[in-house]
Image (spheres, grey):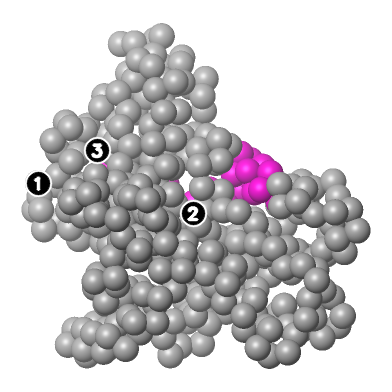
Amino acid sequence: MRIGIVLMNLGGPTHEDNVPIFLRNLFQDEDIIKLGGGVFQNAFSKIIAKFRAPSVAEDYKEINGCPKGCTGNNHCFNRQNKVVSDCCSPINGLTEKQRRGLEKHFKKNLPDAEVKVYTCMRYWLPFADQIMDDLVEDGITHTVLMPLYPQFSWTTTGSSFRDWETVGQEKFGDEGAPWKEFHVKNYHRNEDYLQAINDRIDEALADMDEETRNKTHFIFSAHGTPLLEVRSGDPYTVEIKETMEAVMERREEKHSYWLGFQSKVGPQKWTQPNTEELVARHMEYGIKNFLMIPIAFVTDHIETLYELGVELVEDLEEEGYTFENLKVMDGLNDHPLFIKALANESMKVLDHELKGVQSGNEQEKSKITATT
């Protein structure tokens, strides 16, 4: 068995020049913006991308993830051309750290198994066709699609799976890919994942003095989703709430906590309450200390570092609100327990295949099952 774990993430622009292309790819996705596809959606995506690109590029410049040189994957143009960009999304380098961390985890815990980890982005490099070429070149026999979205939504995990399937059909035809394929749908109640979140919360609280810590309210913030998706049965919002409750159930110190939604795009109605409006409402009641917990984001990027860390503060101050402390929890990124969660969830979907090789290699099977 040659196992390939494909980490699937959103992706982000790596240079100011490709911000419009990234946005166009995003708005062309019918799983997010439901405009019927075709000519109309293509035209809409080009117009909105051109209109928004300058301001979005400025946002990325403020949180540039590679100020000293490329930290992304081998497919990144900046790495290939040895370019230092001032407009690169942190999601690129941080996802690469997750990839390396997971591959290192497997080498340490499964030294006799052949496991290689890849990164596949949805809206920027590397795309599905590039990673499929890598899998073929490496002779992968079993592929696990491992989304970096713990909660399932058709707009995130579903979109990535659909794109992968479409590209695979175009590349391999009716014969299909030369590997067996497995999917991790969700892992929003994985114990290691939940503990990693609580570790990050504890780290954030440790930076506060005792008085501030005792007055701090938790604001869990998740990427919003169109209400149309919720009404059609998308489980994302329910799973977000389940994750939040599971996190809080495992905490000894109790804090007041609330859930808001951010990052609305497009003309549709999205889940409520809006995160900024939720914080403002608390301030109107005299609450002045907040810990923002990006519950649905496992990799820091524009939604956490800019929308919560910069834009939220600026908007509240412009509206005349005052507060004592508003801190954003660090993303999970390459937290060891989160890496362990990814490893265990990946191996879990291969359990049947691994049992199939038990008679041929009992020792290797024992090592694999010991980690899961």
Instruction: Determine whether the residue tagged by mark 2 lies in a helix, strand or loop.
Output: loop
Q: CA distance from mark 2 to mark 3?
A: 28 Å
Does the magenta segment cover residue 191? yes
First reached walking from the N terminus: tag 2 or tag 3: 3
> Is 34 left or right of 40, judged from the image as shown?
right
Q: Residue at x 43, y 49 (%)?
A: 94
Tell me the number on the disc at residue 180: 3
Q: Position of residue 330 (x, y in %)?
A: 60, 54
First reached walking from the N terminus: tag 3 or tag 1: 1
Q: CA distance from mark 3 to mark 1?
A: 12 Å
Comparing labels 2 and 1, the label whose residue is closer to the camera:
2
Q: Position of residue 167 (x, y in %)?
A: 17, 58
Does the magenta segment cover residue 165? no
Instruction: Determine whether the residue tagged by mark 3 lies in a helix, strand or loop.
Output: strand
- Over which residues does the magenta segment extend? 181-201
Q: Position of residue 164 (x, y in %)?
A: 25, 56
Q: Are marks 2 and 3 in contact (CB under 8 Å)?
A: no
Quarter where residue 24 is shown = bottom left
> Is 223 left or right of 89, judged from the image as shown?
right
Q: CA distance from mark 2 to mark 1?
A: 35 Å
Circle 3 residues within 10 Å: few <14, some 14–19, many ≥20: few
Q: Which residue is mark 2?
A: 299
First reached walking from the N terminus: tag 2 or tag 1: 1
Q: Amino acid at mark 1?
A: Glu
Comparing labels 2 and 3, the label whose residue is closer to the camera:
2
Q: Which residue is mark 1?
A: 175
Which of 21/34 is in front? 21
Instruction: Determine whether the residue tagged by mark 1 lies in a helix, strand or loop.
Output: helix
